Amino acid sequence: MSPNEETLLNTLIEVIFTPIFWVVEHPGGTLFLLLVFIFLAMALRDFLQSKNSIKRNFPLMAMGRHALSSVGPPLRQYLISNDREERPVPRYVRKWIEASALNEDATVPFGTQLDLDSPGTILMAHSSYPKLKHEEPGRTHVGEHNPHCEHPYDAALFNTSAMSFGSLGKRAILSLNRGAKEGGYYHNTGEGGISPYHREPGGDLVWQLGTAKFGARNADGSFDEETFAKKAALAQVRMIEIKLSQGAKPGKGGILPKEKITPEIAKIRNVEQGRDVISPPRHSEWEDAEGLLRFVERVQKLSRKPVGIKYCLGDPRFLDQIFQAIVDVGVGPDYIAVDGAEGGTGAAPLAHTNILGYPMLDAVMMTENKLLEYGLRERIKIAASGKVFTGGALAIALAAGADWACSARGFMLSIGCIQALHCNTNFCPSGIATHSSWLQRGLVPRVQGPRASNYQHAVLKEFAMVLASCGYDSADQLSRADILKVVDFHKIQRMDELVPYPDRVASP
């Protein structure tokens, strides 16, 4: 080797190994080299795989792209999006719920952040002579017209909507039911059945029967009358709700990913562990409206309690079919829970979430009109669900025709949900929509339960203030005439003009 070649070789060795020796000799240097090795090994793995073309062609850049994509939503949530832009629940609403749950000041400064001139905006007409003081809102009596009902129920005007044990973890269920117990409102079990965590705090329950009959099903998925009757007799179960469909995925059954199915959940639901649980898109016990009513009557006789049906409205002809059948058969539900297409869920196909179903207000008004047409309004109550997060939203829902309203995401936010949008992954950082024991550790029912109750009380308090501002003493005085809708720029119409009450109202 010539002197020049030897000099060049020594120079190359020095250039390559000097930084390595320097890194190793400094504190943390070995760890740094280990991280570099891991990073390069991951890049080599991506370079050799064949499932993703970007990773195969640009392994290093692909890792950076994935990291930026992952942090995008939280960055937008906290640093980029304003308080009105976030979906599904804007930040200003979440802040109000959080402050209300903590019994902190929930007032807002400096005026509205909403664009009140934007078409589609919903407002309410206050009175020139508001009430000098507001009273606590009353409750709604359910079941008095049902000849089989031995235990009518007085429902609060705002309650916890359906969220199952399975979709939520046990500590979330314990927190929500503890709140219901302290606040005197009901907690809907969701279609997953009654779990020990629904029962332990002792709050009122509405037991929801979905298409899979979880909690009251035989091994083949059919309805188990004996098991149902035994559970329905529990004093804590105040009403039964037969779910036909729900807002976030109308026309499709519930979805519980296999990652969220623990041995305990599999036992409660009587399903297999290790595979996704997908409920049927409809009940197999009937084929038409009359068959549905016969099943409702069957459940009424078995439970001796108020029985309702829940749907997200699709084909409006369904309303004529069901109400005409009630008139013809002489039996019907004690209430109808109307879920809007804007409702939430733990997991749903994109198309079902975005393009199927009527929004809540439209569906409530259409349902009430048909009840009036068929002379059934006094006999059948209406519950509304779909982004009812505040007292103002509750006032609008009741003015549209509902007798009471429910919320799922509102109560989730009250016990600590941060809208991380990981409900379908079992990695919920707030410990609510997960069965991971270390993530659920952050949720303490004795702390979070009272926060749910505080939130419900704050919604009713705000509702009472809105009611007084409209000049009314009770919720049943509200009507569509109190709702205003911006239909175009500088054009506002009353809701009873946009959706008139029927000209002919049948007598009961």
Image (spheres, helix red, strand yellow):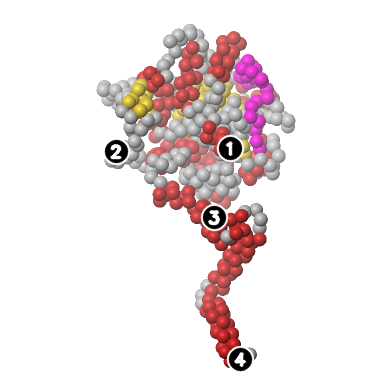
Residue 34 is one of the magenta-drawn residues: no
Q: Please give left or right for residue 499 compared with residue 28 in the image.
A: left
What residue type is disc 3 on?
His
Q: Quadrant of the N terminus?
A: bottom right
Q: Which is nearer the eye, 11 or 255?
A: 11
Magenta stretch in the rendered image: 277-302
Above or below: residue 485 compared with residue 172? above
Alpha-carbon span between mark 1 and mark 4 = 71 Å
Q: Would you name the residue on which mark 4 appears?
A: 2
Which residue of the protein is positioned furthest toward the bottom in this rendering?
Answer: 3
Q: What is the three-letter code of the residue carrying label 2?
A: Gly
Q: Quadrant of residue 229?
A: top right
For the residues bearing labels 2 and 3, Cβ distance under 8 angstroms: no
Q: Position of residue 441 (x, y in %)?
A: 54, 49
> Circle 1 sits on which residue?
349
- Residue 423 in percent (x, y) is at 55, 43
Q: Are marks 1 and 4 in contact (CB under 8 Å)?
A: no
SS type, badge 1: loop
